[in-house]
Amino acid sequence: MAATSQAPRTRQYAVRGTSATGAMPAPPAATGDEGTAFFSRWLKVWIALLSVVTLVVVVYLVAITNSLADINGNLGVADEAVAGAGSDTVTLPQQVASINESLASIDPALQPIPGQADAIIGALTSIDGRLAETDASLIDTSGSLQTTSAQLVDTSGILVTVLGQAGDIRNTLALADRPNGDCAGTSTPGEAAGGANCGGDQLGVQNIHQRVAIANSVLRPVQADTANINTNLVSVNGNLNAICRNGTVQTLASLNGGVACP
């Protein structure tokens, strides 16, 4: 039997959304307006970001500029202060040298201080011991003072009584001193004016020397008169002696038995 050849059959598949011939449908073409809008949006976003970054940088730069300006001003003030201090520091080495010389002269005077401090500590230690002994003595004295205080209370009462009696004596003496005032004309102590006199009731202590002053005022003229009389008597006595020693009188005296002249 003779074999017959057959051509292979072509299989056809049906694809969903395709035509019967198997061709794919073409996608919808993008319009030019949507692409332009997308690009415009991204461009605006980048411009906004760049604007914000630029603004922040500008703010920081302004702040930094102001800070640098303040620093520059402060440096100017500091430069002036340093320039002014420069003239003062010119003599600083000499002043330091002078201070060192003064300290060098002070140092010998300070060296004995530790020894003196030790001596003072020793003296204070001795004083502390003596104060301890004094404290014990004061404790004993406290009891004695309490006893003395009680005795002084008793003495106080006695002194009050004595004071009252002294007051009475003072009043009595005041009355005895000048009970009826000064004598008339004796205002100056030890002197009495003309016509001064004391009353019969003026018998106080002060009136005694006033009465003496009045008596003296009377006796002084008498004393002067007595002195004059005495002078005159001396003169008379001289004259009588001269008469007694006269030759004629002596002759007559010898005839009568002789009388010797004093």
Image: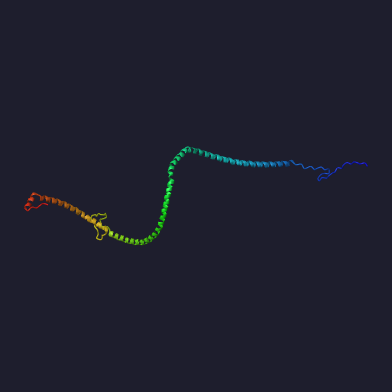
Is 200 rendered above or below residue 58? below
Name the spot of residue 209 as percent of width and height, x first.
25, 56
Closest to the observer, 98 or 20: 98
Task: Give the number of callouts.
Answer: 0
Name the spot of residue 71 as percent of width and height, x first.
55, 40
Residue furthest left as drawn: 255
Name the spot of residue 201 as percent of width and height, x first.
25, 61
Q: How is the image coloured?
A: rainbow
Name the quadrant containing residue 37: top right
Q: Considering the image in quadrants, where does the N terminus appear? A: top right
Closest to the observer, 66 or 255: 255
Closest to the observer, 23 or 8: 8
Taking 58 as reference, is 131 left or right?
left
Is 177 rendered above or below residue 57? below
Name the spot of residue 11 as percent of width and height, x first.
85, 43
Is 248 rendered above or below residue 149? above
Taking 218 as reference, is 59 left or right?
right
Name the quadrant containing residue 198: bottom left
